[in-house]
Amino acid sequence: MDTETFGYKKLRIWELARELVVEIHQMTLKILPKFELYEEGAQIRRSMKSVKSNIVEGYGRRRHKPEYIRFLDYAYASALETIDHLETLKETESLRDTELFTSLHERLTQLSKSMYLFIRGVELHHNEKLP
């Protein structure tokens, strides 16, 4: 199998998303109250996993600019959704660990900003040099 198949793993936004998927998954299973396992916990796990998956799917369609941007937009929207779920967990006191909340919130905010800039880069420079 050629290494191009896994080129998305070289993207910093994918790496940040991967790290956050793991951390949020573990947080929901180990720290949240049990009743949140299938409520807000499930929602935040799905939205974060959607970020990473849509980056990968968009990368797979990168030869077609509109498709690439569409999936990156989905990933960006899911990152914003994940921030909203995290804030809900904090506001409802299901997530009481302030240090963990702050760390996750800052990294999700950084990811969303990086994704926005990445999308702008694709819009402006698509096909100048395909990765």
Image (cartoon, rainbow, N blue to C red):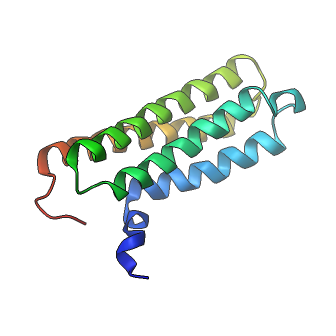
Q: Nearer the viewer, residue 94 or 36?
A: 36
Q: Is residue 71 left or right of residue 29?
A: left
Q: Quadrant of residue 9?
A: bottom left
Q: Quadrant of residue 97?
A: top right
Residue positioned 74% across, 17% down in the render: 92
Of residue 76 and residue 59, the one placed in the foreground of this image is 59
Depicted 84 relative to depicted 8: above or below: above
- In the image, residue 73 sits, relative to residue 5, either above or below, namely above
Q: Is residue 69 left or right of residue 81?
A: left
Q: Residue at x 36, y 58 (%)?
A: 60
Residue 13 image point, x, y percent: 41, 52
Direction right: furthest residue? 34
Q: Which residue is drawn at 70% across and 25% down?
A: 89
Front residue (pair 128, 112): 128
Residue 20 screen position, x and y as percent: 58, 49
Q: Is residue 123 left or right of residue 13?
A: left
In the rendered image, which quarter is residue 66 located in? top left
- Residue at image location 42% in from the left, 52% down from the top: 57
Q: Position of residue 111 (x, y in %)?
A: 43, 43
